[in-house]
Amino acid sequence: MKITGTSSYVKIEYDGKIVKASGEMIVGGFVVFKDSMKAGEEPHSTEEFNNEIRGKVIRDVIEYCKDKDFKVEFE
């Protein structure tokens, strides 16, 4: 897993795909607006991105960040 971004969005790489999510930088981490996770980036933008996939990505990110100094939270 790879998480990159700016102060207003993150890009989360999962299963060889990337989803961009809006949010806000906070001290020690980033808060992602779950509803902004709508689709993968090209060339996977036409593939289905449903609540099940969104939930899996969220669980994987939380697990990935649990031992890191930089936390990603979801709202």
Image (cartoon, rainbow, N blue to C red):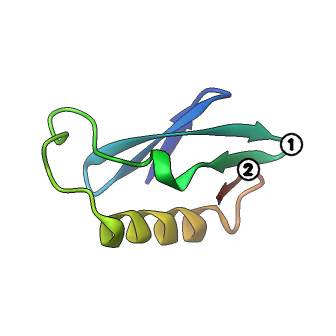
* Left or right side of 41 for 24: right
Name the mark nearer the viewer: 1 or 2: 1
* Left or right side of 64 for 40: left
Q: Residue 57 lies in what quarter of the image?
A: bottom left
Q: Position of residue 31 (x, y in %)?
A: 68, 49
- On screen, residue 41 above or below 29: above
Residue located 70% across and 38% down the image: 24
The secondary element bearing badge 2 is classed as: loop
Find residue 70 and name its label: 2
Q: How far apart, in angstroms, are the residues tagged by discs 1 and 2? A: 9 Å
Q: Nearer the viewer, residue 47 or 14?
A: 47
Dot 1 surroundings within 10 Å: few (below 14), some, or many (20 or more)? few
Amino acid type, label 2: Phe
The secondary element bearing badge 1 is classed as: loop
Q: Which residue is mark 1?
A: 27
- On screen, residue 72 above or below 57: above
Q: Nearer the viewer, residue 22 or 64?
A: 22
Q: Earlier in the sequence, mark 1 or mark 2?
A: 1
Dot 2 surroundings within 10 Å: few (below 14), some, or many (20 or more)? few
Residue most extreme to the front: 35
Q: Quadrant of the N terminus?
A: bottom left
Residue located 58% across and 49% down the image: 33
